[in-house]
Amino acid sequence: MRPLSRRHALAALGATGAALALTGWSDGALATVQEAADEIAKFTGGKAPVKAKITIELPEIAENGNTVPLRISVDSPMTADDYISDVLVVADGNPRPGVATFRFTPMSGKADISTRMRLAATQNIVVVAKTNTGALFTGQQQVTVTVGGCVG
Amino acid sequence: MAERPRIRLPKQAKKGDVIEIRTLLPHLMESGQRKGADGKVFPRKIVNAFTCEFNGRLVFSASLEPAIAANPYLQFSAKVEESGTFRFAWTDDDGTVITADESITVT
């Protein structure tokens, strides 16, 4: 709900007098990590995903947070019996953690998706994939954001 | 108001090929976070859903959040077993659905 990056919030907190007015904002930024965890728990139904099979391609340093390229591929045969059905992407340092949910079918051929996202600040991108049989996999990567995007 | 989507995919493929599809829809993707000069927040208006069907069967779909960048770009794959038509559909927060069709010859 806030167009303020964590960096800006912290800088503002450092400034005398601004601290009181802005405490609520910094709480907001920190709460996102918890919200991201909640979002993931909703997706997994509380089951712990295995750290495997997911490749995340992200720039190490994103100069422009308004458009950060992201590619995700999940290793899967993508047959009618064994395929990746859902892929959840969350960003734990944005005002809201959700980025997207992608749904694949055996007709997708590959569980591979590229898009561009907005990132408010340096943070972790967490990906959780679900197979048609309910197996869960996860992967995570940090991205350094030089200039935050004006995000949601 | 809505601009035409841009779609790239091969015109021809061999049976069983996994082809690459690139789509981009010109759209502001107003996040609902941004404030104008008057301090008022611009109301959220994004494309929140995307689907790709081939000959009426679902290939790929996505739910998008405001953290997807303006002019939403999606690149994904499809396995083609027969000639036919892809239908792409983007759903705006206001309920508008923008669609586009592209056909492919599979030999």
Image (tube, coloured by chain):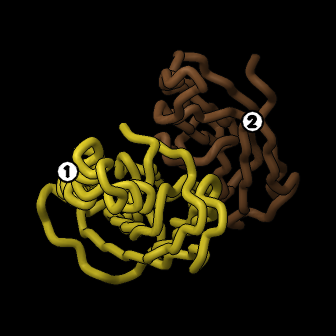
Chain colours: A yellow, B brown
Direction right: furthest residue:
B11
Q: Is residue A59 visible?
A: yes
Where in the figure is residue A94, as x and y percent of width and height? Answer: 40, 53
Residue A42: mark: 1
- Residue contact between numbered discs 2 and 1, judged by CB atoms under 8 Å: no
Residue under mark 2: which chain is it in?
B
Q: Amino acid at mark 2?
A: Pro
Residues at marks 2 and 1, CA–CA distance in whole angstroms:
31 Å
Q: Name the subunit of mark 1.
A: A
- On the picture, is B91 further left or further right than A23? right
**B32 to B9, vertically: above or below:** above
Amino acid type of the residue that numbered disc 1 sits on in the rendered structure:
Lys
Viewer-proximal residue, A8 or B30?
A8
Q: Height in image: B50 above or below A111?
A: above
Q: Is residue A87 in view from this perspective?
A: no
In percent of the image, x 34 and y 83: which residue is there?
A52
For residue A34, what is the image quadrant?
bottom left
At a point 63% along the width and 64% down the height, the residue shown is A69
The C terminus of chain A - image quarter: top left
Residue A65: image location, x then y, percent: 59, 58
Query: In the image, residue A76 lies at what x, y percent?
Result: 45, 74
A135 horizontally vs B18: left or right: left
Determine the residue positioned at 51% across, 57% down.
A119
| A25 shown above or below A85 | above
Mark 2 nearby-residue class (10 Å; few <14, some 14–19, many ≥20)? some
Label 2 sits on residue: B26
> Residue extending furthest bottom?
A52
- Disc 2 versus disc 1: nearer the observer: 2
Helix, strand or loop for disc 1: helix
Picture residue at 29% right of the left edge, 49% below the top: A17
The image position of residue B98, as x and y in percent, is: 67, 24
